[in-house]
Each structure stands twice: as structure tokens, then as C-alpha cells.
Amino acid sequence: MTPTHHPTAPDRPARPTHLIAVAGNSPGVGKSTLCRTLADWIRTTGATVDHFEEADILTRPAFRPVAEEFADGAHSVHPETLVAATRAYVTESRTAGTDVLVTDALLPFIPSLVAWGHDEPTIADVLRELATAVEPARVTVIYLHDDPATALRRAVDREGPAWATWYITKLATSPGTRSAVHDLPSAATHLHHEATLTSRLLATTPWNVLTVEVTNRDAHQTAQHVRRHLAAVLDVTA
């Protein structure tokens, strides 16, 4: 989706951008649906919005070094490459005058860092570097949480058996998860532990974090709940 931008005069400093990072503890929790809903809603307030979809990390110019490094054979990316790409993305967005960035499964990169074999202290260091890299943008992390086994079943029902095979293979061949994951039940166990780690790490950041339990909420109810929270943060009407 092509973002629209306010023109930025050369003598006008780039204003702070608000980055809304939607993440989740498992596939199937509704991240992409929520991102689309939030981006559409925020546009109705008159703000300019860039909706960074999950697959965009492979095509956006700022993240070209990430895509090239991942495709280089190791199927992993150095943390400093992620940090530099994130800094470039936020900087170019601010320069363009974009008011709000809505990102799907981008920041804070914890599932990828875990899969690539990084331990908790290393990931904590990466988050500190990311927090510096995105300044002075304001960051709100929307962390969707559901029972991993339930969410995985939902994802398989939606995407089909081939997706399940791909997902298990991805985790089973990644250095940080290969010893723990070999089927969907073990993937759910891994995701449960990863969610605990994610919550602990996010609590150390300066970002505004909203954890949303989606077990008893449908997509509309989840969006309404998040909109009420963001309305105050963005100073708009929900």
C-alpha cells in the first residue's frame, strides 16, 4: 500500500513520528488484520500513515541490507543490520513527514532473534539499541496474546497444511529453536516460553506497551479495544 505524505519544507525540521508496532505471541492471533484496521482508522483522522506489512521487510529500500543478508545463505541477520535498517526506515519516514507508522511483526524482532540463537542478554542489548535508533519517534507496541496451541490451529485452518509444514521446518532448522521444535505441540510450547521472554524484555524498554488478550475477543472487539487506547495516545477520537 502506497503511503501518502505531507510535503516537508527543507527548512522545517522533521516532526516526531508515532510508530505503532503490532506484534503477537503466535501466528494466528490477528496481527495483520489489526494492522489493516488501525491504518485505515488512523487515516480517517487526517494523519498520514505508512502501513508496513509483514512481507515488506523483503522489499522496502531501508531494509534491503536485511533482505540481502538473509538471502546470503545463513538465513539470519546480524542484529546491527536490523538496528541500522530500522533507523533508516524511521528517519526516512520522519523526513517525508509521515505522522504514523503501523508495522506488522517488525519491531521488536524478538522471535527472529530467538530463532537465530541469541540469548536474553544479547536481545536486551538489541532492544536498547533499537530504542535509541528510533528516537525521537514515539513507540507504542501492541502485543496480541492468545493460547499458542489455539492460535496455531487457527493459522493452520486459515493457511493450510503446507503452511504448517513450512512453519515447523523453519523453527526446526533455526539454531535457536531446532532443539525444541519438531511438531505443532512443541511449537506451541516454544511460543509459550517465548511470550514470557518477550513480556519480560518489553518491560525493560521505554516504549508504551499494550498487551491485549485476544482469547475472548474477535477481530472487531480487539480493534475497538486497541483504538480506545490509541485514541488517547494519538490525541484523536476513537
Image (cartoon, helix red, strand yellow):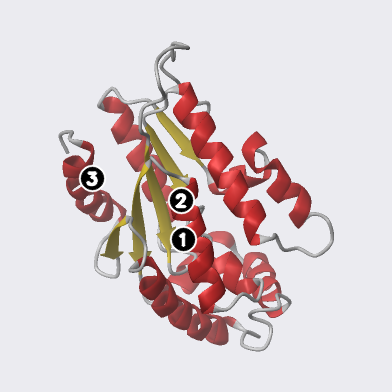
Q: Is residue 198 above or below residue 15?
A: below
- Mark nearer the N terminus (2 vs 3): 2
The local crowd at label 2, few if under 14, some if 14 to 19, many if 20 or more residues have their Cα within 10 Å, is some
Between 60 and 184, the one lying in front of the other is 60
Q: Which amino acid does label 1 sit on?
A: Arg
Answer with the quarter of the image where residue 97 lies: top left
Please, what secondary structure does the residue beneath circle 1 have? helix
Q: Residue 221: image x %, image y %? A: 23, 54
Q: Is residue 37 above or below residue 176?
A: above
Please, what secondary structure does the residue beneath circle 2 have? helix
**Residue under pointer 2:** 132
Say left or right for 202 vs 157: left
Q: Residue 15: image x %, image y %? A: 36, 27
Q: Look at 51% across and 77% down and name the residue there.
A: 120
Answer with the quarter of the image where residue 178 lies: bottom right
**Residue under pointer 3:** 230
Task: Give the mark toward the camera: 2 or 3.
Answer: 2
The local crowd at label 3, few if under 14, some if 14 to 19, many if 20 or more residues have their Cα within 10 Å, is many
Q: In this view, does 73 lie above or below 178?
A: above
Between 91 and 100, the one lying in front of the other is 91
Q: Do the residues labelled 3 and 1 touch (CB within 8 Å)?
A: no
Q: Do the residues labelled 1 and 2 touch (CB within 8 Å)?
A: yes
Say left or right for 147 vs 96: left
Q: Residue 186: image x %, image y %? A: 56, 87
**Residue under pointer 1:** 128
Decide if residue 157 is in sight here.
no
